[in-house]
Structures are given as C-alpha cells and as structure tokens.
Image (cartoon, rainbow, N blue to C red):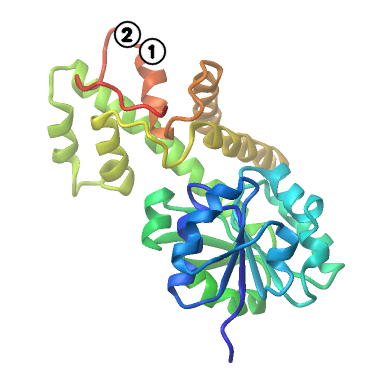
Amino acid sequence: MPSPRVAFLGTGLMGAPMAANIARADLPVTAWNRTPEKAAKLVEHGVRVVDSAAEAVAEADVVCTIVTNAASVEDVLFGHGVAEAMRPGAIFVDMSSIPPKVEKRHAERLAEKGVRHLDAPVSGGTRGAAEASLAIMVGGRKETFVDATPVLAAMGRATRVGPDGAGQLAKLCNQVIVAIGVGGLSEALLLASAGGADPASVREALRGGFSESRILQEHGQRILDRNWMPGGLVRNMLKDLDAVIEAADDCGLDLPFVTLARSLYKSLCDRGVTGYDHTALLLEIERRNEPHRVGDKPDVTPM
C-alpha cells in the first residue's frame, strides 16, 4: 500500500516541527502557511512548500491543520478553498484546539462533500511537537482513525476517544487539569518561598510523591527559572478555558476551579501578558501577594 500523501496547513510554533516529523517518517508532505516565511524553513526537511492552501491539499490523502482558533480553522477550510479542493475520501485532520460543537459542524459540512474528518488536538507543547511525543486525542469514525494512523504516529501517541468532537472534548479535559495544576503549583512554590523554604528544594522533595507529574517536573522548573518563553500561550489557555466553560454550560455543569482559573488567566490577558507561556499564571498570583515572589531570578520574557 503506497504511503499516504500529506498536506500540512499551519506551520507555526507547533505545526512546523510536526510537519517535519511527518517528513522524517518518509511520508510525502506539502505545506502551506498564511505567512509564507514560516513554511519556507521546512524545505530543508524535504517538505514541498506551496503558495496556496487549495494547491497544498489537491492531491493529498490526509490533510492536517493546526491553527489558532475556530475562526482560523473556518477560514482555512471554507475561506481558502480547502474543503472544495480536497478529493472525495481524503481525510481532514484538525489538530487545532476549538470547541467540540464547532468541530461537529465542520465534520457535517465536509461529509456533504465526501471528505472524511477527524478532530485530533494535541498536548505536549513545542517540546512534544519537536520530539514527536505529543498526546493526540482523536474524535471521529474508527475506520477513518485507522486510515490516518500512519500520519498521526509520526507526531506522537494517538488515541481515539469517541465520535466527531470527542477529541476536542478530551483536549478541554487536558486543559482543565493543566490550568488548575499550574495554579496549584504556583501557589505551592510561592508558599514555600514566603515561608522561608527553598522552593527548588521543595520541588525536589515532592518528586516521587503523590504530587509527582509532568506539571511538577517541567512547569515547576520553568517557574523556578522564571522562563516565560512560550510553549503554550496565555491567550490560548484563556481561549480553551472559555471553551471549557461553554461545554460545561451545555452539559449543565458548574466547574468552580475552572471558573477561578479562567478569571486569573483573564486578568493576565487584561494586563497585556498574552504572549507569555501559560505558566506565567504565577505572575498574577504574585501580583495578588506582593511583595512575595518565587526565587530571585530575573524574568525571561518574549520579545
């Protein structure tokens, strides 16, 4: 069976390394990005870069996209002619993070054109994208998932969690845990510092106990380093928490911890801290507890 031909739309912080990893798996890849220079660097990985999204998908068996929000996905699909240009039977794999009900609408519209659909948002940040170790949460038909597996496997570990929209719901569950976990971690390290303990030693002491997690490992170190260079953006976390609250409302649920986390991220965004890593939630908690601060290192911030 020939290797599936892949189109990759959206080659930003996440998309560029993801597309490169697909190419490293010896799958033919054509890429497009709204800002062409962001896609140009993929040529060195054997990726063909083209000028239009419609051209990129015309011969593709699997089309992957990862863009900022639901409006961007809508624009790529129906504004840039992707839905019209895709061949019947081809698979559109949306790896962006958007509301589940929007994803379901896209699946229905594509089905009318004979195009198959998966929603496959990811977790693992830029490091996971570079290392091909992303957690990929997939919604859609089982047969479609099986057919797309060679492409998904080139980027990480893919798990089908249910029908169309279920992948996005799983991503929202991920963001609930991450947002609340980062908040708890920030408060814990601030408490350690204010109480006279060394926060770095406290983090090390907690390793291996019940609070052990990738959040404690990776985000804990990022907070100690005060490194706010983005892996996952503050503004994207706020977008996702808005989607969590919308989904919870649709289910008749009250999620108080999510509501609090959302308000803290909203305060950060209102202060203009939108392009920092989402672990910069610490800055909002510190602001509410001035003059207390975790550590004495200077902040490493985006330009």
Check contact, mark 2 vs mark 1: CB within 8 A: yes
Image coordinates for residue 270, horizontal then vertical, percent: 56, 17
Q: Which mark is residue 290?
A: 2
Per the image, label 2 sits on a secondary structure element best described as: loop
Vertically, is 264 above or below 46?
above
On screen, residue 58 versus residue 7, left or right, reads: right
Per the model, the C-alpha gap separating discs 2 and 1 is: 5 Å
Identify the residue at image location x=70%, y=62%: 164
Identify the residue at image location x=43%, y=56%: 129
Residue 211 visible within the image: no
Neighbours of disc 2 within 10 Å: few (<14), some (14-19), many (20+): few
Tell me the quarter of the picture where residue 62 sits: bottom right
On screen, residue 21 versus residue 293, left or right, reads: right
Image coordinates for residue 58, horizontal then vertical, percent: 74, 70
Residue nearer the viewer, 156 or 88: 88
Q: Residue farthest to the top?
A: 291
Amino acid type of the residue that numbered disc 2 sits on in the rendered structure: Glu
If the image is split into quadrants, where does the C terminus sit? top left
Q: Where does label 1 land, which residue?
A: 287
Q: Which mark is residue 84?
A: none
Image coordinates for residue 162, horizontal then vertical, percent: 63, 65
Identify the residue at image location x=67%, y=67%: 140
Image coordinates for residue 144, horizontal then vertical, percent: 66, 75
If the image is split into quadrants, where does the N terminus sit? bottom right
Vertically, is 234 above or below 270?
below
Tell me the quarter of the picture where residue 288 sits: top left
Neighbours of disc 1 within 10 Å: few (<14), some (14-19), many (20+): few
Residue nearer the viewer, 87 or 211: 87
Vertically, is 162 above or below 225?
below
Identify the residue at image location x=45%, y=57%: 17
Amino acid type of the residue that numbered disc 1 sits on in the rendered structure: Arg
